[in-house]
Image (cartoon, coloured by chain):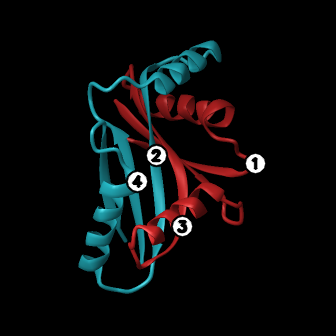
Chain colours: A red, B cyan
Amino acid sequence: MKARVTVTLKTGVLDPQGKAIEGALKSLGIDGVASVRQGKVFDLELTGSDKAAAEAAIKTACEKLLANTVVENYRIEIA
Amino acid sequence: MKARVTVTLKTGVLDPQGKAIEGALKSLGIDGVASVRQGKVFDLELTGSDKAAAEAAIKTACEKLLANTVVENYRIEIA
């Protein structure tokens, strides 16, 4: 089984990295981009076939390690 | 218009960061994860409403700035 975890900054949290990318895009002459926010993505290869158990384990992983839930949201997709 | 660009390492490219996360998950007692690979995600807010033009601009942005196409793949989703 495979899972993808997407971690993004919560709304209202400043994203200096995204701002830098915005500036760089303008310098490169790429217009039409109003704002950029950067996040992280984790592709997990899972052993076992119990989807509910996998989702619970990944939720724990997100809360403990993958996301800083004070400033970040996470989303789990299991395929 | 919004767009999401997902940048992931190509298959076969070593991912030490992913390996470190794998180790950390094991240390935390979270089992069932065979491998982890980390990537990046960019959420772009676009001005204008021409989807084809936006996709072309984002493709240029990916090639020039967001992804290192030697070792990374990118995927563009426009919503």
Q: Is residue A79 visible?
A: no
- Are both tags, 3 and 2, on one chain? no
Q: Disc 4 marks which residue?
A: B66
Residue B37 image offset from top left, x and y in percent:
42, 30
Element type at mark 4: helix
Picture layout, residue A18 above or below residue A78: below
- Identify residue for label 2: B40
Dot 3 amino acid type: Gly
Count residues near mark 4 (Cα–Cα under 10 Å), then give few for <14, some for 14-19, many for 20+: many
Are labels 2 and 1 assigned to the same chain?
no
Name the N-terminal-most of marks 2 and 4: 2
For the residues marked 2 and 4, what is the alpha-carbon distance in whole angstroms? 9 Å
Q: Which mark is residue A23?
A: 3
Q: Residue at x 45, y 66 (%)?
A: A25
Q: For the residues marked 2 and 1, what is the alpha-carbon distance in whole angstroms?
A: 20 Å
In percent of width and height, residue A37 lies at: 55, 61
- Where disc 3 sits, the SS reads helix
Q: Nearer the viewer, residue B45 or A51?
A: B45
Q: At label 4, which amino acid type do we have?
A: Leu
The quadrant in which the C terminus of chain A is found is top left
Sequence-wise, the earlier of marks 1 and 3 is 3
Pointer 1 local density, CA inside 10 Å: few below 14, some 14–19, many at least 20? few
Can residue A4 be seen at all in this image of the molecule? Answer: yes
The residue carrying pointer 3 sits among few (fewer than 14), some (14 to 19) or many (20 or more) residues within 10 Å by Cα, namely: some
Q: Are marks 3 and 4 in contact (CB under 8 Å)?
A: no
Q: In which quarter of the image is residue A32?
A: bottom left
Of the two numbered discs 3 and 4 in the rendering, the one whose residue sits closer to the viewer: 3
